[in-house]
Image (tube, grey):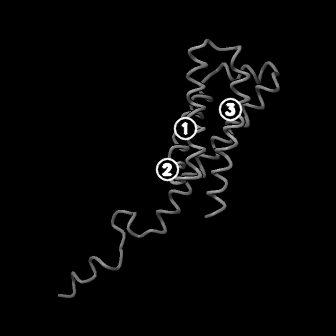
Amino acid sequence: MGTVTRAIQVLILFSIVLGVFFLWQAYPLLPSEVFYALTFGWLLFVVDAILTFFRPRASYFLGLVLAAVALVETLSQPEHYAFVENGDVPATVTLVLGSVAEALIVGLVVYYIVSTRRNDPWSWPGSESGTAGDDDGAK
């Protein structure tokens, strides 16, 4: 499980670094209101990166939400595909690396959640714990 949590942490930190390049590329193309909204989203990733060191479990849930929102927003914009069609290599590399990183964060966090719940018998509804319910038929 240590490699999964380390991979999630590295991907969140990678998203921070890639976000700097993304903001640098997006600044001349976007209106200021949209750029400020993107900067706010990047700052949320910075907060998530800090949380990975102090409250990792909370960080994974926040990272899941942020990565899912970023991935859906990225894939739903037809303007992003125009960068690929026009042959803009820096924008295409940023788009592809960012999308892959966000998809990996989503997949690994879901895997982490399922794995940790599977190891804890109290986590799943109806799971047998060995302490409650064993004496019900013994009377």
Secondary structure state at the residue bearing disc 1:
helix
Badge 1 or badge 2: first in the primary sequence: 2
| Residue positioned 55% across, 35% down in the render | 44
Q: Which residue is mark 2?
A: 58
Q: Is 60 or 88 nearer to us in this picture? A: 60
Residue 59 relative to residue 12: left or right? left
Which quadrant is home to the N terminus? bottom right
Secondary structure state at the residue bearing disc 3:
helix
Q: Callout 1: 10 Å neighbours few (<14), some, many (20+)?
A: many
Q: Is residue 23 depicted above or below 123 in this figure?
A: above
Residue 85 relative to residue 108: left or right? right
> Going by the picture, which residue comes out furthest to the left?
139
Please state which amino acid type lies under the numbered disc 3. Answer: Gly
Which quadrant is home to the C terminus? bottom left
Q: Which residue is mark 3?
A: 19
Q: In the rendering, at what x and y percent does residue 62 appear?
A: 51, 43
Q: Is 33 or 89 nearer to us in this picture? A: 33
Secondary structure state at the residue bearing disc 2:
helix
Q: Quadrant of residue 88?
A: top right
Q: Which residue is mark 1?
A: 66
Please state which amino acid type lies under the numbered disc 1. Answer: Leu
Please state which amino acid type lies under the numbered disc 2. Answer: Ala
Q: CA distance from mark 2 to mark 3?
A: 21 Å
Q: CA distance from mark 1 to mark 2?
A: 12 Å
Badge 1 or badge 3: first in the primary sequence: 3
Q: In the rendering, at what x and y percent does residue 82 appear?
A: 72, 19
